Image (cartoon, rainbow, N blue to C red):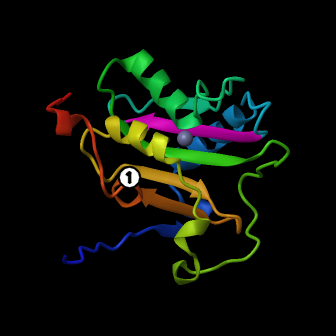
Amino acid sequence: MKAVTRIIEGWVGRFEDLDGVVKEMFYVAREVRKNAQAPYSHYFVGVAGQSAKTGNIYRGCNVERGSWTQTTHGEQNMLDSMIAFEGKGAKLARLTLLAGPENMDIVLPPIIIRKRGIWEVSFSEIPSPCGHCLQCIWENCLEDGDVEMYSLLSTGEVAMVTIDNAFPLKFGPADLGVKY
Ligand SMILES: [Zn+2]
């Protein structure tokens, strides 16, 4: 056996330094998060995603059902809205994700509690889509590993990870011979 390694990269910065569209997407994610239907977990998720083709911003929140397995995740909800509007093979450009307990009010622009450099932030602190959603997201990245996923750290700073870094071992449409 021979070890195979890769470096996983992420970026941390200030909300005020984001470009205007990403800032707007965070506000959209905050608004849609309020619509989450999560009476079981009480964990509210809001997601905004931008289409690469049209620039439109789509939104999604988590929708739980009592049977659990039929729950829709926020990222999936956003992606399905994009596909419903733009058709199959719609390409995601980037997304913003806000998640936390139902009673957690997310303030935007975020208040910096403690400013840190990237060398002080561990990967486990960066909110990320779940494994199910990473797969859903990758399906509509159309082989573009640079699709950016933004979230907020508890410090009030913004974290960004590309799908390529968050989901290094991918399985997607191309592996089944599908090309949109
Ligand atoms: Zn998920």
Residue 90 versus residue 135 in the image, above or below? above
Task: Tell me the residue at 72%/59% (across/down).
Answer: 110
Q: On the picture, is 30 further left or further right than 167?
A: right
Horizontal and vertical percent position of residue 13: 55, 69
Task: Tell me the residue at 19%/78% (across/down).
Answer: 2
Dot 1 beta carbon under 8 Å from ligand 1: no
Report the predominant secondary structure element of the magenta stretch: strand
**Residue 1, picture quadrant:** bottom left
Residue 133 versus residue 107 in the image, above or below? above
Judge whether residue 63 is colored magenta: no
Judge whether residue 44 is colored magenta: yes
Horizontal and vertical percent position of residue 96: 54, 46
- Front residue of 13 and 142: 142
Task: Tell me the residue at 37%/61% (across/down).
Answer: 165
Horizontal and vertical percent position of residue 54: 37, 28
Q: On the picture, is 85 further left or further right than 179?
A: right
Is residue 34 visible in this depiction of the protein? yes
Residue 104 versus residue 58 in the image, above or below? below
- Front residue of 15 and 10: 10
Please state which amino acid type lies under the numbered disc 1: Ile
The C terminus lies in quadrant: top left
Task: Tell me the residue at 33%/56% (across/down).
Answer: 164
Q: Quadrant of ligand 1?
A: top right
Residue highlighted by disc 1? 163
In the image, the segment drawn in magenta is 43-51
**Residue 158, picture quadrant:** bottom right
